[in-house]
Every structure is written in structure tokens, then in C-alpha cells.
Amino acid sequence: MKPTLILGALLTLTFTLAALLSFLWTPGDVEAVNIAARLQPPSVAHWLGTDHLGRDMLSMVMTGARTSLAVALVAVGLGMGLGVPLGLAAAARQGGWLDELVMRANDLIFAFPSLVIAILITAIFGPGALNAILAIGIFNIPVFARLTRGAALSFWRREFILAARVAGKGAPRISLEHILPNLANLLIVQGTIQFSLGILAEAGLSYVGLGAQPPVPSWGRMLADAQTMVSLAPHVAIVPGLAILLTVLGLNLLGDGLRDALDPRLRPSRA
Amino acid sequence: MSVSSGQKYPGGPGAEPPVRQVSQALLQVEGLSLAFGGTAILRDVSLSLPQGEILALTGESGSGKSMTALAAIGLLPERAETSGRLLLSGRDLMTLPERDLCALRGREVGMVFQEPMTALNPVQRIGDQVMETILIHKAMSRDAARARAAEVMARVGLDPERIPPTRYPHELSGGQRQRVGIAMAIALRPKLLIADEPTTALDVTTQAQILDLLTGLVRDEGMGLLMITHDIAVVAGMADRIAVMNAGRIVEQGPTAQVLAEQRHPYTRQLFEASRHQAPLAPVTPGETQLSVQQAVRDYPLPRRHPLAPRRMFRAVKGVSFDIRRGERVGLVGESGCGKSTLSRAILGLEPLQAGMITLDGKPILSHGRPDPEIRRRVQVVFQDPYGSFNPRHSVGRIIAEPFHLLPDPPKGAARQAAIAGALTAVGLKPEHAGAPIHAFSGGQRQRIAIARALIIEPELVIFDEAVSALDVRVRAQILDLVAELSRRRGLSYLFVSHDLSVVRSITDRVLVMREGEIVERGDTSDVFDNPRHWYTKTLMEAAPRLRAPETGGEDDAGGEPL
């Protein structure tokens, strides 16, 4: 196993555990404002210091991880859940009207700047974590639909698919039974990478005030709150920035590592 | 033949005067052994190839012949553990640094690959690709390189009038692409040309032309040719010497005529017997008509030239009619693109017909564009590719049982296991193989599994679509025996689709010869083969490589007539 895969898995695991732990316990209360203790540097009492309202930064990062991971996970799940079946269907009917429809709808979504759509959704439904999920999820659909269609098309040309057709199986059944399991590796890898992009997108939306609303902590808003205090207390910007960086890095390393580990073509053949 | 301008190549680093070393062999391999992580691939291989001769290296897949070729061009993988010497014009390639090897490849050793599709860069014009090999070695100026490229392409039979150097690889046929590959290999007049299965991907008629071209090049230019092939028949007529490899060793080598006549090593004998193998086909009395193909027409839409242009159609099958009677064994031969695969897919109900009808026992295979499961279960198929025709994630049992989907009431539990075990036993495998994953099996075993899959629902007709084309000769002989035995035991009728005439001859009663979507000749197999009437059948017969009786081993015509 490659060291990058292990490092990626460790980073991802750390942030996931921190997010899960935050449900049960955090060092401090993220909703308790203590102006007297504001902008303290890291110390024994506050390992990562305190922010401009005196809240414990470690607790904020842990709870923020919960928001980031949850939003990204649900958004990628939404994109995969809709994109993969659409891609399978388009591949099964290659060149047909369904294929055209799915692919042109994909082009349409790709053609819109994602931030504009997010602002649009927020303008209609109001800001909040749910709407961030929706905005990020919609942009994940074409990614998975395209990937699935492309990979599925190459399988449709294989002889074992012909053999399944000779056995009287129809396109939906072949897609589920023969094609989807063969795409699993690919989808896991792409899912990991989209997950990291989702975290970045959530941070971006929260930064401009379109994501999770106060008092729910979020890495993006922590950065936004910190930007006026960078010169006074650099740690308030560095801590959420590092959290985002390390999580995204971890997920990308994990995705690349999984790709190498799961791809049979890159594995030494057993001859 | 010389460069028309009379220009000599400027010497590269370490260039030596073009003196022909007659005393010493061009390529001398001495005790070459090679292993990967402790697994021996080559064991003590010794070969010698004099200038101007053809050495055929033959053996089955995995015998180490391609690895030997890679060693001869200095392209062995980094992690290979080697011993022994490999001398090219007296220099040991095993000790040369990579930089010197680079200078050597293309200039002193040229290589022709098996797949003319993948050996060329699809986005580069063919003339530029040939020119590039010359320019990489800085052997001459751009203009001279262009002139040399044109000259060498004319030499390999690419007429600039018909196939200008501005063409792209996808605009060429397989044989033309292989000619480009040869042009690239010989552009710098290497002393040694290595051809790794150069005709395996080509049709028989094209194969004969490419073999002629290679032989002509060796005779005219005096280069040495190391020809790697799994098919002894291909090289029997052209090689000066033959070396037979098995499991990393050279088991027999010598002058072609002598090896063919003596066959001292048992492995060589097995190879020869297998490639001339006749499956024991029991005579049958055909019953009533089973499959009937009437005026079948299959069109494919071609892309429109521009959005408003009418759709053009390519007619792959042009009104073909034939019958197969119960118990009959029919062959369908033709070269790639003749429509034989399209036709077999139409019989399987996988492709709709534009006109005509295909019926089984009087009932149409497709009714209103949908296959009737009741009819479809009576026809099954065995495909060509033993590696591509199984879902790599499924176990053998699950693969074999897939056609049960066609039955209204498929067997379950113990009955299902018994049926799988029965099918495995029928094809010479063991019932306990059902639980194993498919990647644990060799190519020949996989074709047995494919046959088990086709037989499990006891169809009346089986289509063998190039079912033995990807197999080594000995395995092929075993599979053909199995097919013959199944026909005898079960009274199975089949349509055996193949481009390989010798296979069709040994395994069928009646044969259909297909060309450009039409059946040009049909009749009893022995009649058609012994006394072909249509010119195309005659061409096919003449082009097919044959192992002649050993005693004739005379010189073949080495006339250096340029193509």
C-alpha cells in the first residue's frame, strides 16, 4: 500500500472522528460567548485559542467539521444517486432520445456558473445548510452522469454484455447486474474527489454567507469572521484554513490512492 | 536500392563504417536467462541470426518468444533480472546504457508490432510518422528525411498516388497500416528487423502480401529478420531457420526444412500435429430444416456528411439466404468486415433486420422487433474472446447459469447446482470449478466455460463466433475435439463462423463463403475446399498458410521483385 493512501486515509479519518466526537463532547461550548476571553492565542485551556467572541476554536473546528462533512456527503450522495442512474440509462440507450436528453441537460448545468445558481437558490429559498446541499448536489449530477455514461459505454461493447443479451436479459437488468458492479471502483474514487470539492464549495458558500447560518459553526464562516482580525490574531484565520486544507488534501490523497489500489490495470498482474 | 540523391547518412555518435561482418552473426544470443521477482521467464536461450537470413521464433503464448524479442531491442522492463549475453554486431546489449540503446533502436534494430491499429499514432499523418523515426536519430536533414520517407513508403507498397503520406492511420486498412509500421521500422535501414506477430491481426490474403513484403526486404536489403509467430504454418514457407520455444527454453532449432522434416523434440511434434489437427467428426444425416435465413438485409446508418444531408446507409448483409438442417454442421468463412459477425448476431436476435426474415423451426426470431424468449433459448453462442466474454466479477457457476434467465421456470437450489455441475462435466471441467472466480482459468478453460454456458439450457443450435481464433494450436485442437464430441453425443447443429479456413474444414459438413455481405460460394466442405469455383474462394485458399509435407522443403522463390 502506498504511503499517500495511508496519509489520506488518516487525515480523512481524523476529521471524521472529530466531527462524530463533536456530537458527544467538545472542549468548550460553541454557543457560549465570552468577550473577555476573545482572540486568545493557543494555550493549555484553549488548545487552538479563541475567536473574536471568545469561543473555543477547537470546539468550533470540530463542530464545523460536522457541518462541512455532512453538507458535502449529502450533496455528493444526491449527485451520485441521480447522476449514476441517468448515466447508466443514457449508455443503455446510446444515441437515442434519452441519451440526448440526459447529455444536453448535463451540458446545460455545466454551462451555468455554480455560484450564480447557489445565489439563485438562496434568493428563492433563503440561506441555510440545506440549500447549500441542493446547490452543490445539482452540480454533482452531471459529473457522475458523464463519468458513468462514458465508462458504461465501454462495457456495453464487451462480449460478456452480448452474452447476457443472448441470455435474454434486458438493458435495465444488464445495467444493474453487469455494468454497475464493474463501475464501483471508478465511482468510489470519483466520489472521494467530489467529496473534497464539496467541502471546498461548502466553505466557499459559507464564506459569502450563503451556507450554514449562525450559530451553526462552519469553516467557511470562521474564515469570513477572521478576515478583519488576521493582523491581530493570525490563528483565527490559520486554524479553519488549515482544517479545510488538510481535509481536502486528505480526501484527494485518499481518492488517488484508492484509484491506484482498486484499478486492476495498475496492479501487478497475476499472470 | 539506394537513396536516390546518392547522399550518405552523416555519422551519428559511434557510427561505424557500413562494413558487412560476414564472419560474425548479426544477432548472437548466448545463454540468455531472464526472471521477474524470482519467476524464470527465459532459461538459457541461445540463438544466432546471420545477416540476410530469416529466423522464425515460434511457440505458444507465454513461451517467452516476445520477451526474447524485447531483449533483442533492449526494451526489457527495469526490474528484469538477466544473465547471459546478447550481441548485436558484436556489441553486448545487456551491458549498454540506456542512452546508447536509444541510439541503437530504429537505427540498427527496427521493430514491427502485431497491432497495426495501436502501433501508429492516430493523430499524426503517416508520412510524418515515418519521417519522425528518421529525424529522431538526426540521420539527415528534413528534406532528405522527407525524400527517404517517401522512398521507403513506396518500397513497402504504399503508392503515393493512392495513399499519399498526408493520410491519417484511421483512413487506412489494416494491411496498409502494417505497411506503414514496416516503413517506420526499415526507414533507417536497420541491420536487424524484429517482427512480433506482424500478420496475426490481418486477414489471410493481406497476411500473404505482408509476408511477401518482409521476405523481399530481407533479400533486397540484406537485413536479418527475427520473426516471432505462434503459427508455424506462417513461417514454414519463408524462414531460413526455425527455433521452437516452450516455457522459456528453446527446445529445437535448425534449418527450416530440417526442423519440419525431423521434428526431433516431442513438443515440436505436438505443435505440428495440433496445427494439422482434424477433429473426429461423426457423419450425420441431417433432419428437417431448423434455421432458415431468407433474404436477410442489415443496414447500418453512416454519419451524415452535413446536418441537412440525407442519412447514408452501409449495407453489411446484402440479402443472404441459407438453411441449416437439424444436426448439420455449417461453416461461415470470410475476411474481417464481410458481414459474418453481423449475420450471426442477427440470427441471435441481437440485431434487427431491415428486410428478409430469420426463422427457427418456422417461427421468426424477432417478432415486432422483440426477441421471443421461447425461440431465443434454442440458439446460443460462443464468442471469440476468452477474456472479454465473461463478467470479471462473477464466479464460474454464476456465469454458466446466466442463460437460465431465458427459462420460464429456471431450476433453483440443488437442481441448479446439478445443472451447473453437469454442464461443467460435459465440457471436461470439474463440478467444483463452479465456485472459482473466472480469472483463475486459462484461455482454453475459459472457452470450455463459454461452451458450458451455451449448452446449459440445451439449445438446438449453437453459433461459434470465431470461438477458437484466440487460442494456441494445441488448445484449439482440444476445443475442436470437444465440439466434435458434443455434436456426436447431443446431435447438436452449429454454425461455425471463422476466418480460418483450416479450422472450418476440420469441423463442418457444409460451408458458406461470404464476401462483402454476400455468400459467394456454398457447398459441401470437402467439395468447396478441394475444388473452389468462385475466384474469391480460390484466392482465400491460395493465401492460407499451409504446412506442406515435410519432404518438399525446397527453396521458395526469393525473387526480389518490388511490390
Image (tube, coloured by chain):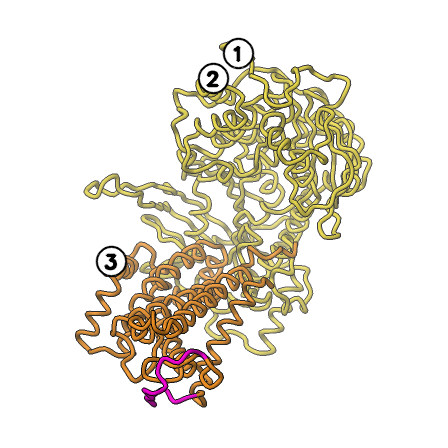
Residue at point 24%, 61% (across, down): A113
Q: Find disc 1 in the rendering and name its residue.
A: B7
Specify the amino acid type for callout 3.
Ala
Question: Where does the image place residue B157, in percent across and percent down from the top left?
Answer: 49, 22
Tell me the CA gap for discs 1 and 3.
Answer: 58 Å
Toward the top, the furthest residue is B6
> Residue drawn 48% across and 69% down?
B405
The residue segment tinted magenta is A28-42
Is there a contact, CB below 8 Å, between mark 1 and mark 2?
yes
The chain assigned the colour orange in the figure is: A
Q: Secondary structure at mark 1?
A: loop
Residue A100 among magenta residues: no
Q: Residue B144: give its label.
A: 2
Pinpoint the chain carrying mark 1: B
Q: Are marks 3 and 2 on the same chain?
A: no
Q: Residues within 10 Å of mark 2 (few under 14, many from 20)?
A: some
Mark closer to the chain start, 1 or 2: 1
- Secondary structure, mark 2, is helix
Q: Is residue B331 left or right of residue A208?
A: right
On whether disc 1 and disc 3 are found on a single subunit, the reply is no
Q: Quadrant of the N terminus of chain B?
A: top right
Q: CA distance from mark 3 to mark 2?
A: 50 Å
Q: Nearer the viewer, residue B501 or A37?
A: A37
Q: Which mark is residue A111?
A: 3
| Location of residue A169 in the rendering, given as x and y in whole percent from the top left corner | 43, 65
User: Which chain does the yellow colour mark?
Assistant: B
Chain letter of disc 2? B
Q: Is residue B547 visible?
A: yes
Res B114 → quadrant: top right
Identify whether A62 is placed above or below B378. Answer: below
Task: Please say whether residue A37 is one of the residues in the magenta stretch.
Answer: yes
